[in-house]
Amino acid sequence: MGLTGGPFRGSRLLLCENLPPCRKTLEIFEEKFVNLLQLIPASAAIALSLSAIPASSVENRSPANTLIASNAAGAMIPAASPAGPVLNPGPADSIELNRPPLVEDACRKREVAANATRPAWDYAASTTQCGVLEGDFGFLSQPMGGGVSQQMLVSSMRYGLTPKLDLRWGLTNHIFQGGGDSPSVQGSGDQWLGARYRFVEQGRVVPAMALLYTGKIPSANPAKGLGSGFVDHQMVFIASRDLGKSHFDFNTLGTLAGSAQGFDGAAQFGLAVTRPITSKLSGILESYGGPQPGTADRFGAGFLGATYALRPQLVFDTAYTRTYTAGSPRQQVLFGFTYARRSGFAPLPRSAAFARFLGR
């Protein structure tokens, strides 16, 4: 319906009824307005047809439609195409880009979880989380025979240098021996420096495998019988595997113990089985032993322990050990905890060849 015969008829100025130039101008305006109204249904139909196009049909879009910016609402704005303007999709009709998912940097994860090495003797192939500083502290009590008992405060610090490599420093903070007819003795023990590197990840058949080297710094006083006063070396081969809900850690430990006559070597073996009891509580069963350097006595012991993860970064532990060979303390009782947190140190750059060699 035109404006001359429609509802706009009464809205004309009466002056235009008797002035031909004014009436001519008004008729041109009415014609343009009617043409504009006729375009509205066509525009709506085009918009509805575009909204029905699936996202997969635009994966091979031309470079002219590349998303180049975002508006205040967070929607990406495409550049103009040579064929004309491209409609800006709203949040409900946003186009999904077929991009590969971003791989999170393992050395910058916000979540921190402790990788406890206590209380078992056998080590796991898993290393301290990259960029995380981890410390454990424990108390150990054992009878030495003849009414003499020994208590020790032990601790260690570990830092995850890469996802496959951690560095460690362990020390015996304090040793106390007393009881019976002998005078009491106390002092600090030896210190250890080492590194653990995982060179094989667990597969369908092979277990995860790692090597751990530690060297002893003879800081204990040999005159008090708290240490040998010589440097020792230890190399541990580690194989770890998950079977169902159980986790197995097998260790082969080679020791070179220093003495005034040089070094004496021996090899020991151990197997630990860890199984979760609840979401936070896990039980550990272990057997460990073999020849000892510097003596003909062999060492063998059974181990029963447990860990409780109060938080992912805080784990408490306790254990009881019973030996079944002579020449060693008959039993041990120990407990302690492990705590992990972000160190604040910048990780090694992934672009460096040396860092990639170390597993970065």
Image: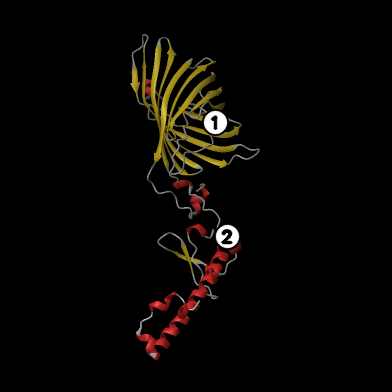
Q: Return the x and y of residue 177 as percentages of the image width and height.
A: 37, 17
Dot 2: few (<14), some (14–19), or many (≥20) neighbours within 10 Å?
some
The residue labelled by disc 2 is: 55
User: Horizontally, is 323 left or right of 70 in the view?
Assistant: right
Residue 268 visible from this viewpoint = no
Quadrant hosting residue 314: top left
Residue on which the image places disc 1: 254
Residue that appears at 48% across and 58% down: 91
Left or right of 172: which side holds 281? Answer: right
| Residue 149 seen by the camera | yes
Tell me the kind of residue under disc 2. Answer: Ala
Q: Is residue 85 above or below residue 360?
A: below
What whole-number distance in Å separates the C-alpha atoms at marks 1 and 2?
A: 61 Å
Q: Where does residue 358 sit, x and y in percent of width and height?
A: 51, 47
Q: Residue furthest right?
A: 205
**In what element is the residue under mark 1?**
strand
Q: Earlier in the sequence, mark 1 or mark 2?
A: 2
Q: Nearer the viewer, residue 286 or 147?
A: 286
| 1 vs 2, front mark | 2
Residue 295: which disc?
none
Residue type at mark 1 is Gly
